[in-house]
Structures are given as C-alpha cells and as structure tokens.
Amino acid sequence: MSVSDLGAAGYLSYCATPKRPDFRVPEGAVDAHCHVFGPATRFPFAPERKYTPVDAPKEQLFRLRDYLGFSRNVIVQATCHGRNNDALVDALATSDGRARGVAVVGADVTDPELDALDRAGVRGVRFNFLKRLVDDTPHAVFERIAQRVQPLGWHVVVYFEAQDLATVAPLLGRLPGRIVVDHMGRPDVTKGADGPEFARFIELMERNQQIWVKVSCPERLTVSGPPYDDVVPFAHRLVTTFPDRVLWGTDWPHPNMETHMPDDGVLTDLIPRIAPTESLQQALLVTNPMRLYWPEEMQP
C-alpha cells in the first residue's frame, strides 16, 4: 500500500489497497459517513471551494463498501462540491437503494428541488461551521432551512469544532427535529475524554435528546497517530453513554489529509474498541443508521 502520491493541491490520495479488516461487521452494517468527489470532468468542483480533492468516484466507494463488509452507505455532500448535489444524487441513483444522502442547500432552494432530492434518497441537510472550509452563514438562514426540510422528515447534520460549541449550542437548541453532530464535535483529544471541555458536549447531549453523534474521524483528531489510542476513549464514552444515538462512518476518501492517510481496514478494526459488545455494535452499525435513513424497512 502506498499513500505517498499527492493529489490536487498537495492532498494525499485515499488508500487504494486497505487491509482486510480483522473485525467482521454485523450483517446489514452501514457506513454512515462517506463522500463522493467528482470525477471532476463530469461533476466539476465548486468555484468557491476552499480545497480541491482527489477524484473519488462512486464506483470506488461501493467497492470499498463491499470489501470492508458493509451493506450500505450514507453519502454526505462535502464543501468542495458546494450546493451542487449532482455527484451525490448520481451515486444514490446507481446504489440500488443501498445508499442514502445528506445534501447541502442554500436559502434559495425551491420546494420542487427539495422534493427531487428527497425522491433521490436524501434524508438530511448539512450545516458546516468550520471557517477554514466555508464562509460564515447567519444562524437565521440555517433555522429557515431546517424548518423547510421538516415536512420531508429530514434531519440536520452539523459540523463544528469543540471551541465553537458555546456559539453553536444556542442554535442547536432552536433547530427542530433530529440533529446529528459530525465527528464527535471535533474534541481536542489532548484535554482528555473526562476533561471539562468534552464534558460540555456530553452535557449538551444529555439535555437535548434529539442530538445524535458520529463517532468517526480518529485520523483527524489524533495527536499520537495510528492506532489512535488517544481518540478511542472519546468514542467509547459516547457509544456507551448514548448507545441509541450514535453512528459510525469511514469518512472515505478522507479529504484534506496532508501528512497521514488512514487505512480504512484499520479504521474498521477500531469498532470493537469503541463498541466492545455485540449489542453496542449492532446499535452503532445497523439499528441506529437504519432508524435514521431507512425507517421504512424497520420492523414495527
């Protein structure tokens, strides 16, 4: 395996030959956070993007899904494609119902456009607060969008860093419906899973039963590097404290990585460390994502 090749703007390309995971995921497991990028010749990247990723087409994503043993994907629109969800919709259309999507839309999105996204398999809308990736958007705009997607049964996905929690938390309290926080709220892992900073995020989830969280992206949070021992306690605490409100995803193809590209097989092998029992693994990988993205298939 080689991750030495640099893609556009110096970013590493995804690991093309990941290891076969030692951990066997349960039947029906969902990779609940991944992306498709381009190919740029067919789906150009947004002019306003803050980074240019390596092409990562749907065909490679679906091959990885099968190789790792997963059954389904939740594909999340990333900022490099802006508000043009065409690559996402195309991937959903060719997934044979095995993928759902999270889109990015603006305040000017029309009801027919939302309906079309819903028919395509979109089940959520993403709000990004990372200033290095997006320009500022007034919170009132996010509130209006959240209200508009409620009739469709969509949820809201939010992406922020731990230092921004105090600013974002009031907005989360005003948003209707379910809210999914990306990547554990990006904690500073040097401050410890039992420290006061992460405790504030735990308290937020305890107060607001509508908030779910993805225990994903150790490669972005780690200081020590693989095997991500410094990140495991954060994910483990969330999984064991909120077993019915956690999701897991690869974050493939891991955009913006400049020095370290994770092996998705290694990431999959982390799952039993953060969800140490079969019941926790079943909830994390099957029951919870199915409730959120394929509720029509759940037993009454």
Image (cartoon, rainbow, N blue to C red):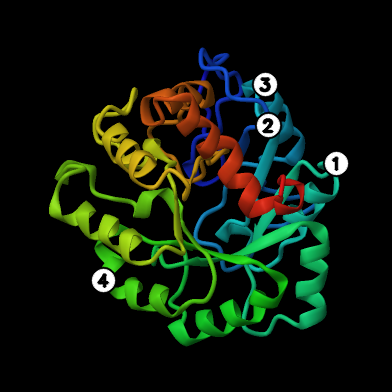
Residue 172 at x, y percent in the picture: 41, 73
Question: Going from the N terminus, do you reach mark 1 or mark 2 first?
Answer: 2
- Identify the residue at image location x=82%, y=79%: 112
Question: Going from the N terminus, do you reach mark 4 or mark 2 first?
Answer: 2
Is label 3 in a helix, a strand or a loop? helix
Is label 2 in a helix, a strand or a loop? loop
Residue tagged 4? 166
Q: Amino acid at mark 2?
A: Gly
Number of other residues with Cα within 10 Å of mark 1, as a class: few under 14, some 14 to 19, many 20 or more: few
Q: Is residue 207 left or right of residue 289?
A: left
Q: CA distance from mark 1 to mark 4?
A: 41 Å
Q: Residue furthest front?
A: 300
- Identify the residue at image location x=50%, y=25%: 268
Residue tagged 3? 67
Is label 1 in a helix, a strand or a loop? loop
Along the line of sight, the residue nearer the viewer: 93 or 170: 170
Q: CA distance from mark 4 to mark 3?
A: 40 Å
Q: Nearer the viewer, mark 4 or mark 2?
A: 2
Residue 96 numbered mark, or none: 1
Question: Going from the N terminus, do you reach mark 1 or mark 3 first?
Answer: 3
